[in-house]
Image (cartoon, grey):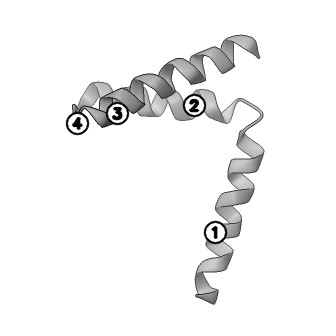
Amino acid sequence: MAVTVSLVLLFGLLLFFLLRSKSLGAGSAFIAVMFGFFLASTGASAPINELTTAVINAIPNL
C-alpha cells in the first residue's frame, strides 16, 4: 500500500507539471495511464467511482 500511494503521488506530480507546462505527448499519455492505474489500486478508487456514478445520475436531472 505504501509503495502504491507513493507511486500515485509521483505520477500525479509528473502529470500536473506536464499539463501545466503544456508538454503533452506520448510520455504524458503514459504518465496519465500509470497515474490512473496506480490510483485505482488505492483506497481512493471507491469514492471516485461513487462520485462518478453520482454525477452521471445527476446529469438527466439538469
Q: Amino acid at mark 3?
A: Ala
Badge 2 crowding class, 10 Å Cα cut-off, few under 14, some 14 to 19, many 20 or more, is few
28 relative position to 43: left or right:
left
Q: Which numbered mark, 4 or 1, is in the foreground of this view?
A: 4
SS class, disc 4: loop
SS class, disc 3: helix
Q: Which callout, 3 or 4, points at the residue further toward the start of the chain?
A: 4
Q: Is there CB contact under 8 Å for labels 3 and 2?
A: no
Label 1: which residue? 55
Q: Which numbered mark, 3 or 4, is in the foreground of this view?
A: 4
Label 3: which residue? 29
34 relative position to 26: left or right:
right
SS class, disc 1: helix
Q: Which numbered mark, 1 or 2, is in the foreground of this view?
A: 1
Q: Amino acid at mark 1?
A: Val
From the viewer's side, name the closer residue of 13 and 54: 13
From the viewer's side, name the closer residue of 7 and 37: 7
Does 3 sit above or below residue 5? above
The quarter of the picture where the N terminus appears is top right
Q: Which callout, 3 or 2, points at the residue further toward the start of the chain?
A: 3
Q: Is there CB contact under 8 Å for labels 2 and 4?
A: no
Does 54 sit above or below residue 41? below
Q: Is there CB contact under 8 Å for labels 1 and 3?
A: no
Label 4: which residue? 22
